[in-house]
Amino acid sequence: MSPVATERRSGPHQVLLAFYALFTLAAGARAIVQLTTQYDDAPVAYWLSLAAAVTYALGWYAIRSAAAGDTRFASVMLWVELAGVVTVGTLSLVVRDWFPDASVWSDYGIGYGFVPAVLPIAGLLWLRRQKSTHLARN
Amino acid sequence: MPSVSTQITWIVVGYAALVAVLAIVVAARGLERPSWLDQMAWMLQLLLVVRALAGLGPLLGDDHPDSTSTYVGYLFAAVCVLPIAIRSVDGDRATWSSAVLAVAAVAVGVIAVRLEMTA
């Protein structure tokens, strides 16, 4: 592999990709199990967990594309994810009745050590750096 | 005295923490990923396979887990995460590849704890 290819392949985005893959798996498996086995307990929370899993899958793809040079999708997707975490986190604190059981983003991701809240912020910081690197190269 | 599977879980958690800390140290020092880190990761994988095999006991016996689907999910994830992470950094020994192994090691440690909680 050429040094340029290695440089593009290797970087902090690898850690972000690892987290996004893990959270796609964790949120997706959790949502599917809950939706199929205990749907009536907290349907809103379980559907929101599924939405979170889809967001992580799209976030993974967005970061992969941004690492390859196309930052457009990531610029939208990471903000969508951040908005989701903030909105669901706030709703779970304000409208407790909607969340008899927790979703992935409940209480800003407290069940996952607040990683769901940190992840889009870390992604946006990386994206900002990635954009400036891309501009400097061109 | 804790059961054999519980004892294996705590060995897995301790070893995963060690792998994660060493991987973070390697990454923080900006070094290339050393081969001994790969060997430690594969040793962790071996422990996870042993834990998963021990975890088949509750499924085959009379004392089933509260949520079988959740339990099977954790069993499956416990043995899949690390090989996927190692495969993703295959041929890449740059600094950040160690950080990927650190993330995977932390993840399997957490999965092992969750597996124990759902057993």
Image (spheres, rainbow, N blue to C red):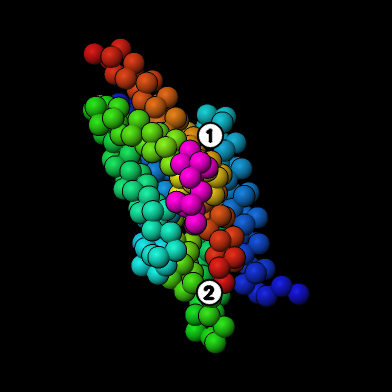
Query: Is B87 drawn above or below residue B67 in the view shown?
Result: above
Residue at the image position 34 percent from the left and 16 percent from the top: A132
Q: Give the magenta part as a residue range.
A: A89-102
Residues at marks 1 and 2, common chain? yes
Foreground pick, A89 / A130: A89
Q: Considering the numbered disc 1 on the image, is that residue within a helix, a strand or a loop? A: helix
Q: How far apart in space, not on screen, are marks 1 and 2 (Cα)? A: 40 Å
Q: State yes or no: residue A100 in magenta.
A: yes
Q: Please state the horizontal and vertical placement of residue B87, each as a whole percent of the image.
A: 37, 50
Instruction: Find residue A126 and report its image quarter.
Output: top left
Q: Is residue B63 above or below residue B94?
A: below
Quarter assignment of residue A79: top left
Residue on which disc 2 sits: B66
Question: Going 29% across and 42% down the picture, which residue do you hit?
Answer: A58
- Which amino acid type is shown beneath numbered disc 2? Asp
Question: Which residue is depicted at the point 39% across and 27% down?
Answer: A124
> Mark 1: which amino acid?
Ala
Asked if the residue under mark 2 is in contact with the one under mark 1, i.e. CB atoms within 8 Å, the reply is no
Residue B16 in sight from this viewpoint: yes
Q: Position of residue A49 (x, y in %)?
A: 39, 51
**Dot 2: chain letter:** B
Q: Is residue A29 visible?
A: no
Q: Is residue B118 above or below residue A120?
A: below
Give yes or no for residue A96 being in the magenta stretch.
Answer: yes
Q: Earlier in the sequence, mark 1 or mark 2?
A: 1
Residue position for label 1: B27
Callout 2 crowding tier (Cα within 10 Å): few <14, some 14–19, many ≥20: few
Secondary structure at badge 2 equals loop
If the image is split into quadrants, where does the N terminus of chain A sit?
top left
